[in-house]
Image (cartoon, grey):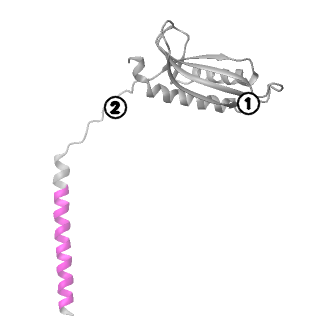
Amino acid sequence: MQRCKRIALSLICLSACLLLLSVSAFAEEGQTKRPLKDTPQRVAARATAVSVEHEGDDPAGIRLTFQLKELFNTVSLFKLTDSDSPKINLLISTQPEFASRPEIGSAYAVVWVFAESKGNLQYYLGRQVGVVSDATAVNVARQLAERTDGIAVKYNYLFGK
């Protein structure tokens, strides 16, 4: 019994010594490092120049193009422009899903190209196809804007900034 008490007491003393050593080492390590200065810096704003060209006369396709242009005009990530400057062009082609009932929905194809200027050859960046209706036009426009932002980030080096 006495022997167990001595072993337990020895273990307690040993663990206390180890604890004191680790605390003192931690305190010395913490004292050598100086805190960083709190100097916030402004993040550079990014507004990608975009242009939207639509081909088609179906109601759902027109609504999709209108929603997309409205989104590009209101979101700070994009600058909707027709100027002769480096930009991403969205070429949208739509047609009725059913020729006899164009109000039901439209099939669309979007091609993203980069244009240095109006006289230069445009560079292919991506494409997407799908179906849109009046009810889904807002969500599809958001998806296309999100994809446009991803393309703008991926090909940011083309803008020479």
Residue 70 point in image, percent of width and height: 63, 21
Circle 2: residue type: Pro
In the image, residue 86 sits, relative to residue 36, either above or below, namely above
In the image, residue 39 sits, relative to residue 160, either above or below, namely below
Residue 1 within the segment the image draws in magenta = no
Residue nearer the viewer, 77 or 99? 99
Q: Secondary structure at mark 1?
A: loop
Residue ID at (71%, 20%): 62
Residue nearer the viewer, 64 or 113? 113
Furthest residue toward bottom: 1
Identify the disc placed on residue 40: 2
Residue 85 point in image, percent of width and height: 48, 10
- Magenta stretch in the rendered image: 3-26
Give the CA separation, mark 2 to mark 1: 46 Å
Query: Mark 2 or mark 1: which comes first in sequence?
Result: 2
The answer to which image quadrant residue 43 occupies is top left
The answer to which image quadrant residue 156 occupies is top left
Residue ID at (71%, 18%): 56
